[in-house]
Image (cartoon, helix red, strand yellow):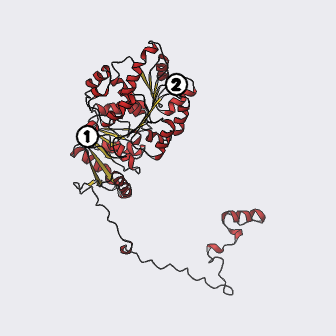
Amino acid sequence: MQFASLRLVEPLLRALSSEGYLTATPVQAKAIPPALEGRDVLASAQTGTGKTAAFALPILQRLLANRAAANGHRTPPRCLVLCPTRELATQIGDGFRAYGKHLPLRHTVIFGGVGQGPQVDALRRGVDIVIATPGRLLDLMEQRLIDLRGIEVLVLDEADRMLDMGFIRDIRKIVAQLPAKKQTMMFSATMPAEIRQLANALLRQPAVIQVAPVATTAEGIDESVYFVEKRNKPQLLAHLVNQLPMSRAIVFTRTKHGADKVVRHLHVRGIRAEAIHGNKSQNARQRALENFRSSRIPVLVATDIASRGIDIDGVSHVVNFDLTHEPETYVHRIGRTARAGASGAAVSFCDREEVANLKAIERLIRRTITVKHEQPEYVEARPAPVAPQQQERRPHAPAARRPAPTPHHHGQPSRRQAPAAQVRPSHHPLNGPRGRGKFRRRRIVAFS
């Protein structure tokens, strides 16, 4: 469907055309019409399908229509977009800037990890749209630095991720301060039962949109897995970066320490790479993303905090250096490639301890991932299951017998030859040879 057929105003169509967007994705084509009508929306779509434009375009058009009432004066925010991570908040802000560049609407992005001064200054100057992470927004609300009484539209983006990160209580606190009469839109890559319960509490007769089965991967991704020992993963990664080649690759690790370690391994092998994770400052993270976007570095190493917050065109490969134990996270990770109809590749490394994670992922996506064996010096064969009756049992060595005590004085063992268990309590090393009375007995009980 063409954007021109979605009843969008001319400034929005002009901005979309300048960005090279002419055809709407399925989630955009299904979500924009009910959103323009003012209905609540509950949308489930896989990552990388254009959910940001699906809610940003109707919001911009609605706020533009009501702009005359503001008369150009400074007004409190009229739209609030909540999202789980700083990277995703920045990405959404970039989307509003691109789509609304021909409109007299202002927006600001609010997140933690940086000083709040510039954010407060932007709020004081007046904005129409606030894109925020829940933690920093609550801080500003408690300081009475933001007024949310004029909110007309509320958007919860990546609602399932916010639920996983423990933001549900913060969201409820924020929603309690908003006007009861408003339009609410909820977008999520997956739709677990908890998200449906939250939707039932916040949405009123929503338009329910599901453009793909829950947790399916985007089309155009070539998925493969290498069975490799854990110690050989860095060598395999460096080999594939050079040989495939990986012109622009995102590597996902399980931990922050693991991300830094992978970067050091790549540097040793002459490959430029940078890491982004929660321990990095916001400036360092933005610098790493900009270096990756401008192709100054070919490899960006990230933890799952960035698996839904990176929107960079031309990512050729996604590498699951560590296979996640959450199958849905695998879908979000590999969704960083093959975006907007492009093609890409997702490569996973699986060691012996991650076979169960791989099986869970294959059950979720309902297919078997292709096993690669092009590099036999790095790849380990898939471990074959062994039946219990075929398992080799090692014979148990006979227990060593304690030597019999030497008879001494009517057949009793001497004190020198007595085993440790028969040492008199008064000579126990914890009591000392002079221990006496009640104190001695308490110490014997405490350590016996």
Name the spot of residue 106 as percent of width and height, x first. Answer: 41, 20
Q: Secondary structure at mark 2?
A: loop
Where the N terminus falls, by quadrant? top left
Q: Residue at x 73, y 63 (%)?
A: 442
Mark 1 or mark 2: name the one nearer the start of the chain. Answer: 2
In the displayed orientation, state which residue is furthest to the right: 437
Instruction: Work out whether residue 415 or residue 375 is closer to the camera in this orientation and state it.
Output: 375
How many other residues sit within 10 Å of disc 1, few (<14), some (14-19) or many (≥20)?
many
Asked whether the viewer can see residue 285, the reply is yes
Name the spot of residue 284 as percent of width and height, x first. Answer: 39, 32
Asked whether the viewer can see residue 431, the reply is no
Q: Badge 2 is on which residue? A: 148
Q: Is residue 22 above or below residue 359?
A: above
Image quadrant assignment for residue 28:
top left
Instruction: Work out whether residue 305 or residue 264 is closer to the camera in this orientation and state it.
Output: 305
Identify the disc placed on residue 316: 1
Instruction: Work out whether residue 62 or residue 84 is closer to the camera in this orientation and state it.
Output: 62
Name the spot of residue 59 as percent of width and height, x first. Answer: 40, 26
Instruction: Work out whether residue 271 or residue 390 is closer to the camera in this orientation and state it.
Output: 390
Q: In the image, is 398 to the left or to the right of 24?
A: right
Of circles 1 and 2, which is in front?
A: 2
How many other residues sit within 10 Å of disc 2, few (<14), some (14-19) or many (≥20)?
some
Total marks shown come to: 2
Q: CA distance from mark 1 to mark 2?
A: 41 Å
Image quadrant assignment for residue 158:
top left
Q: Specify the amino acid type for callout 2.
A: Leu
Name the spot of residue 344 as percent of width and height, x first. Answer: 25, 42
Q: Secondary structure at mark 1?
A: loop
Q: Is residue 103 above or below residue 263?
A: above
Q: Specify the amino acid type for callout 1.
A: Ser
